[in-house]
Amino acid sequence: MSSQQYATRALCRTVVLAGCVLAWPAAAAENEVTAPPIVTEGAAAAALPPSSASAAGETREASAVPVEPARAPEAPASKPELTTASINPSAAVPDEAAPAAGVESAPRAVVVSADRTEILDECPVIDICVDRYLWALYERTPKLDKIRETERRVVTVKRKGRMVKVTRTFTRLVDNDFTWKDPKAADRVRLTMMDYVIGGMDRGFKLKLFHALHAAEQAGLSPGITSAFRDDYRQAIASGLKAATNRSYHGGSLRGGYGHGLAADIVSVNGPTRAQRWVATEQLWKWVDANGKSYGIGRPYLDHDPPHVGPINGEEYAKHRGSAVKVAAAETRKHKRLAARQEHHAAKRSKAVRASAPSSRRTS
């Protein structure tokens, strides 16, 4: 190969390299990709042997197309993608407390405090949650009341001018703590306290009582249960105002026994002192009188046994508060008024007869 042919080839190579250098910035800006390393003219000349480099230099001077060496911009060094700890505002924040998918969450328990009880879940089995709620009301209520105690004492009194000793009966109200009675009765039949006290009530009555007391709780009255189911033994050890041992509507054997209790005693636990709780309890009873019928419960004895509640469609309520009882009471009052009027007229007639008797004697 002659020196002239070699120089021609070097010139062509230089022109091609120069065209590539001029076209590279536009292609890099359009495609935004990293271009391969560019070999400049000087580098190409340095790569040639000395004879070829001199020939290439002569040919470049003779060329009519000026070629300016272009400096290629440095391509930014590629960095590995980093994972930051920031949270995308549009992304959902994971809930650590949320249950895993496909796992059924356990029903939340009843929250009990000194002044409030709430159900925090949707019950899969209503009977279980009703029992738990009523048990929570029973468990938070102090088992205290006042009972009448009679005492016979010998006293000295004055009769017909002289002092004699007689026996008198005195009645007084005393505090009564009956917390121990239900556990003893439950242990006697080998049941848990919850199964004995709450489980012994009639299912329909429990549902009515649940809805009524839950509404009272929402009204801020803080209801509580002091007594629910009672069997014959529990009724026998009860004190104060009570029914016969086997006739109690709380669950006596004559009323059906276990599972048929149709009565409960309710009070309010709102207030730190007993006096404040008594005021709140009277408000609860008034609320039951005004709203209980819409839930199916009522107080059959009113002031005779204030805490006692039962179903309004039951025998006990109908016997003491039913329409037939009201009609009978009205008829009784009517007969009493008529009898009193007749006695009054008879007394007036006898008085007139006695007054006219002396005058007739004087006339004769």
Image (cartoon, rainbow, N blue to C red):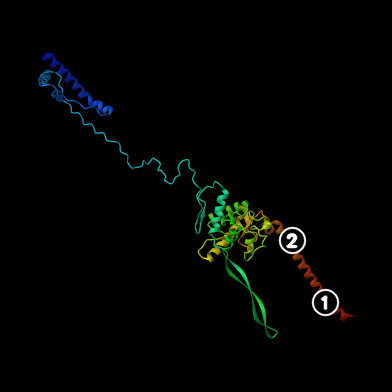
Q: Nearer the viewer, mark 2 or mark 1?
A: 2
Residue situated in front as seen by the camera: 285 or 139: 139
Neighbourhood count class around disc 2 (C-alpha, 10 Å): few under 14, some 14–19, many 20 upward:
few
Marks 2,1: beta carbons within 8 A: no
Label 2 and label 1: CA atoms lie apart by: 35 Å
Residue situated in front as seen by the camera: 244 or 281: 244
Residue positioned 55% across, 57% down in the render: 137
Which quarter of the rendering shows the C terminus? bottom right
Query: Is residue 325 visible from the viewing direction of this image?
Result: yes
Looking at the picture, which amino acid does disc 2 mark?
Glu
Residue situated in front as seen by the camera: 164 or 280: 164
In the image, 127: left or right of 168?
A: left
Element assignment for label 1:
helix
Element assignment for label 2:
helix
Residue positioned 57% across, 51% down in the render: 130
Above/below status of 320 relative to 364:
above
| Residue 218: % across, % down | 53, 54
Neighbourhood count class around disc 1 (C-alpha, 10 Å): few under 14, some 14–19, many 20 upward:
few
| Residue 238: % across, % down | 62, 64
Above/below status of 159 relative to 353:
below
Looking at the picture, which amino acid does disc 1 mark?
Arg
Residue 141, located in which quarter of the rendered image?
bottom right
Q: Residue furthest right?
A: 364
Q: Which residue is mark 1?
A: 354
Residue positioned 79% across, 72% down in the render: 347
Query: Is residue 221 visible from the viewing direction of this image?
Result: no
Q: Which residue is mark 2?
A: 331
Q: Earlier in the sequence, mark 2 or mark 1?
A: 2
| Residue 136: % across, % down | 54, 56
